[in-house]
Image (cartoon, rainbow, N blue to C red):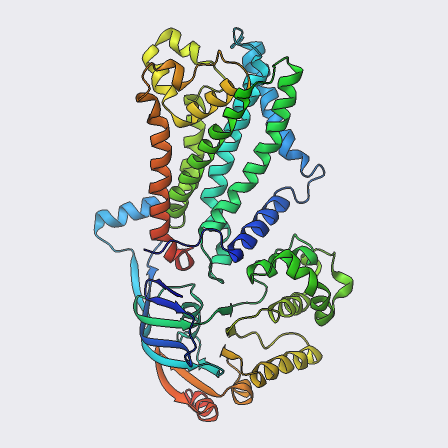
Amino acid sequence: MKRQIGNRIEIQTNGDIAIKVKDLHKSFRLPTEQAFGLKQAIFNRLRGIKGYKEQKVLRGLNFEVKKGEFLGIVGRNGSGKSTLLKILAGIYYPEKGEITVDGTLVPFIELGVGFNPELTGRENVYMNGALLGFSNEEMDTMYDDIWEFAELKDFQDQKLKNYSSGMQVRLAFSIAIRAQGDILLLDEVLAVGDAAFQQKCSNYFLNLKSHKQTVILVTHSMENVRKYCDRAILIEDGKIIQNGNPGKVADAYTKLWQ
Amino acid sequence: MNIPLVLNRKNRILLKELTKTDFKLRYQGSVLGYLWALLRPLMMFAILYIVFAKLLRIGGDIPHYPVYLLCGTTMWSFFTECTSQGIQAIVNRGDLLRKISFPKYIVVVSATWTAVINMLINLVVIIIFALINGVTPTWSWFLVIPAILELYILSLGIAFLLGSINVKYRDITSIWDVLTQALFYAVPIIYPISMVADTSVKAAKVIILNPISQAIQDIRFGLITHETITTWNYLGNIILAFIPIIITFSILIIGALVFRRKSKFFAEEV
């Protein structure tokens, strides 16, 4: 099975490379002044103004992720790592270069995507599950486990707006970890809940690691990089400046501003 | 060319769940809840009926005029709801588009389905009213199905086309609001087309070439009375009568193509 959308290729093979990124470029058009609305668009065109500024975010990335590897991606704010993750997830499209994904990919760019404060916890669980590809029947079977893990059983039929933010994240995390895929993309989802819940999360990640699940983790926590990752990549200014041993990459990251 | 798998399992689940939430949220926090889906068009009908049928005395010569009017207003509400919800769908669901990857058309289709459900509920009411009013059921009732389908296809085409432009230029929402107001009077909903024909046959023929007019008149013809003027029995030229259908499908195709080209960048632009 092979599917190609623009510069993105999705395949299912028995090879040992899960993700291959080749000379990846991405830039955004940032509106300079109020370029929203027809009036401004016509005005800009008449005056020969482009109405946007080209912002280069990724400038030629090359790397591979092996199957069963736990890869960490680190970098400062604005270095381009979130953009990279969104391209891997298929949300943004690369403008140049090529990305090949082998296997099904489950992205967690954010926890609780599609959560609606006006709906009850129960309704939100089903909605969020659907976004992960679970049918109503499948959700039924794991429904109780989700609430058990989140430790929120008594709040099932409360509207989500009555949950504290910590409770919302806990619920979202409990749903998210049900997702099954060949490759997991995680963006900063480790830091949720209180110490006891953190312990549960940590167990989940160690479990992924021991089961040789392919994971790509974007994080600011060097402690997590050292603890979970087999390899790490340091991105600065849209380029990979270090790729290899997680300990060394973590050190290089800390030295960036020293 | 890469045509998304229209109904693979994952997309089907998503479509169903999004429609369900849309419908729930629409009437969230209101005392009468889902009943509003029924009450709103009935109230609009009541107002129009009092103003046009009772005060201005339009439509006296049309049999079952109240049902005839209700039928028109319901289908019009369906069209406006479908298009306005569909056009805003991408912007309204921006939070989803920015965070997960899925075929974007699902968002538009699910937004229009709330309108479809509302319309179907109202269709039942129309049928009950029709029976009370003394309309006898005939096989021609089934003509309603293709006509409604055509109206839906047209709405979806408009939603795809304008919805993808609306991501960048939010003016579209306001422009479409005004445009539908104008369109309302260009479609024979509150006035019978025979009234226009009395002054200008040419104008009547132009009006009936509008796909919305054609669909609504077909529904009335099938459901209420065969005395209804339709594109098919009025133009006297069968080739000309296909114009509304050609317009409908052209809009859908253009809409789908534009949507497909632009949808790659929705996540960045929304």
Number of marks in the rendered image: 0
**A47 vs B64: above or below:** below
Q: Position of residue B243 (x, y in %)?
A: 33, 26
The structure residue drawn at horizontal position 51% and vertical position 58%, both measured from the top left corner, is: B96
**Residue A151 in the figure: left or right of residue A34:** right
Q: Position of residue B14 (x, y in %)?
A: 55, 54
Q: Position of residue A162 (x, y in %)?
A: 71, 58
The structure residue drawn at horizontal position 40% and vertical position 27%, both measured from the top left corner, is: B211
Q: Residue furthest right?
A: A154
Question: In the picture, which quadrant includes the N terminus of chain A?
Answer: bottom left
**Residue A51 in the figure: left or right of residue B22:** left
**B27 vs A237: above or below:** above
Quarter residue B74 falls in: top right
Whether residue A115 is visible to the viewer of this picture, yes or no, is no
Q: Position of residue A61 (x, y in %)?
A: 33, 78
**A69 vs A37: above or below:** below
The structure residue drawn at horizontal position 49% and vertical position 88%, both measured from the top left corner, is: A230
